[in-house]
Amino acid sequence: MADVDRVLAGDVRAFEGIVRRWQGPLVNMAWRYCRDRHRAEDLAQEAFLRAWRALPQWRRESSFSTWLFALAANLFRSELKRFPTVNAPIDAAPEPFHGATQHHSLAAQQSSEKVRRAVLAFPARYREPVILYYFHEMDVAAAARTMGLPEGTFKARLSRARALLKRRFPHLEAENAGMESSALNNGKEA
Amino acid sequence: MNLTKDNTASEDRVGTGQAAINRILATEETLIPSSGFLASVMERVQEEAAAPPPIPFPWKRAIPGMVLVTGTLGWGAFEFVRHAISDVHQLAFTPPHISATLVAPLEEAAWIALALGVSLVSWLVSRRLAGRSGLL
């Protein structure tokens, strides 16, 4: 807040403190939207620039982080609408491979990545609630505020997104359980 | 009895599925911004801060011209409709009587009004497009 006040008083260098504090969260948030490191940094940089321009309009009705995340989410949404990431449609995302493999941890990583990619292939109204819900560590209120949606609407969209995921990956729990037990057995044998 | 067991198993499966999804999506790798990120952002912010403020649109000067153009267009439209209605009532085509000395200046004024109108429309459209693309 002190940095914000100094920036508003005309101290441009004070903005460095804001960037230093929020660069990690914003880059990671952008990463969840596009899953491309370079693009995530570009998007986060643009978000900081927008924040710099819009800082005098921040009315302090909400916390600075809420305002910053909402601004960033709006930017990421519009930028990805203009230049979408290349994603396969959700039905084309393959079911995580359930075969005997010696590299269980690698297979688990791959199947997790497929689930994350499948989320990016959702229609925008279901994709963003999932991204923001897990970005905010499953805090529905914070995620809903970032999207500017009532909590009820947010929950409904999140629930629909989860249903889509479960329908797409019906054997996910069995596979994960299988992998975990195999990993445990391997650990015991070792 | 079996039905109860099936239901419980089904609920457990749903719960496990949800837990698996939660586990996958919640355990996301954490990116650390590259070393030059902070400097790069601050460079752009400094550039922005050093740049002169955008020149505001001169509304005070433009408003009289815009009022004139709007008035001319409105008057033209009104006259057009009035002539069209009177023509319909007469059911016979009688060209409006305008003396030869007035024809040329009227034609020039009409062209000027048209050009101003087109300019106004194109300005409004470009402003709208620039606004949509985030340039404004």
Image: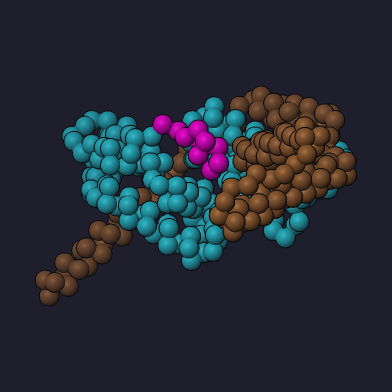
Residue A79 is left or right of residue A18, and the answer is: left
- Give the color of chain A as drawn: cyan
Q: How is the image coloured?
A: by chain
- Quick check: B52 above or below A171? above
Position of A83 with respect to B67 (left or right) is: left
State the residue lying farthest toward the top.
Answer: B36
A125 versus B136 height, above or below: below
**Taking the image as drawn, is residue A28 in sight?**
no
Q: Which one is in front, A37 or B28? A: A37
Quarter residue A110 falls in? top left
Q: Quadrant of residue A186?
A: top left
Residue A33: within the magenta? no
- Where residue A125 appears, as percent x and y from the top left, is 45, 51
Please give left or right for residue A161 compared with residue B98 in the image. Answer: left
Q: Position of residue B72 (x, y in %)?
A: 76, 46
Q: Is residue A141 left or right of residue B19?
A: right
Residue nearer the viewer, B15 or A78: A78
Q: Residue at x 13, y 72 (%)?
A: B3
Q: Which residues are magenta?
A: A77-86
Question: Residue at coordinates 22% horizontally, 63% vertically from top-left?
Answer: B10
* Quadrant placement of the C terminus of chain B: top right
Q: How many callouts does the rendering have?
A: 0
Q: Look at 28% across and 37% down and name the residue there.
A: A92
What secondary structure is the magenta-colored segment mainly? Answer: helix
Judging depth in this view, the residue of A108 and A66 nearest the camera is A66
Point out residue B48 in the picture as x, y percentages from the top left corner: 78, 31
Chain displayed in brown? B
Q: Check residue A85 for magenta coloring.
A: yes
Q: Is residue A92 visible?
A: yes
Q: Quadrant of the N terminus of chain B?
A: bottom left
Residue at image position (72%, 44%) is B97
Q: Where's residue A47, x and y in %?
A: 65, 39
